[in-house]
Amino acid sequence: MPQVVVLVADPDSELSADVAGALSARDVAVTSCRTGAEALVLAGRLAPDAVLLAAALPDIDAAEVVKAMHQVLPVPVLLGAGPADADAAVRALTAGAAAVVARPYRTSELLPYLDGVRAEQRAGELGPVLRVGPIELDAATYEVRLDGRRLSIPLREFELLRYLMDRADRVVTREDIARDVWNRAGPITTNTINVHVKRLRKRLGDGPARPPLIRTVRGVGFRLVHPD
């Protein structure tokens, strides 16, 4: 099985060394850098399976790095944030970060995400083309088309859409999504899931001309529906 490769971008070399040592002990290959610019260059060169990005970078706002990262390759970006980084965390989530994790980093919090990467590698074949109404998703090529037009979708939103399409017309709870998409035993923050659903709805063109394909079931979760 190929080794999981993680790119860590953090200006604190001590924190980077600590997390690299902890993850290496779990058979995760870590490459570290200190700035957002270095992270973008290395991402294109290494094609890592995941990126761990500090909220406070010395050169570029983390949200801008997340946006640029998704133009380089579809990879989950985890944002490391401390108590003073709440605003940066919200901006990064809106820009496409997969999740926010505590900084200083905790191996127990990072491993569930990386286990999800391993599961994808272990799966090998990712399944057939899925179609729900105007949406077509090819899990083998990571392509999504809406009315025949190809969409650019970050990896975490792709996984969320595939999960909903697999269960079209069925209600899935936020706990289901947290466990199966984010690979967490317990729920992640409601806001994280809501932000990803909101971004996915926008990409699918919800508006006056097209009723929402992803419906909210109040107090329960979400349901992807076939259009009437």
Image (cartoon, grey):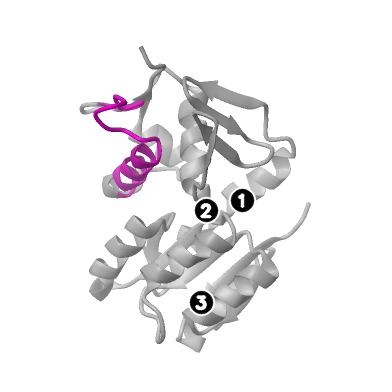
The amino acid on which the numbered mark 1 sits, given as a three-letter code, is: Val
Going 24% across and 75% down the picture, which residue do you hit?
A: 84
Give the distance between the C-alpha atoms of the residues marked 1 and 3, in whole angstroms.
Answer: 19 Å
The label on residue 117 is: 1
Q: Is residue 206 above or below residue 36?
A: above
Going 51% across and 59% down the picture, which residue do you hit?
A: 70
Rendering coords of residue 46 (x, y %): 69, 69
Going 45% across and 86% down the picture, which residue do you hit?
A: 12
Q: Is residue 57 left or right of 32 when viewed as pictured? A: left
Numbered disc in front, either 2 or 3: 3
The label on residue 9 is: 3
Q: Is residue 21 visible?
A: no
Please report whichever mark, 1 or 3, sits nearer to the chain's N-terminal start: 3
Label 2–label 3 contact, CB within 8 A: no
Magenta span of residues:
192-216
Q: Which residue occupies the foreground of this view, 162 or 171?
A: 162
The label on residue 113 is: 2
The amino acid on which the numbered mark 3 sits, given as a three-letter code, is: Ala
Q: Which residue occupies the foreground of this view, 132 or 112?
A: 132
Q: What element does badge 2 sit on?
A: helix
Toward which corner of the image does residue 58 lie, by quadrant? bottom left
The amino acid on which the numbered mark 2 sits, given as a three-letter code, is: Tyr
Q: Is residue 153 left or right of 139 when viewed as pictured? A: left
Please report whichever mark, 2 or 3, sits nearer to the chain's N-terminal start: 3
Give the distance between the C-alpha atoms of the residues marked 2 and 1, in whole angstroms.
Answer: 7 Å
Q: Is residue 200 above or below residue 4?
A: above
**Is residue 198 covered in magenta?**
yes
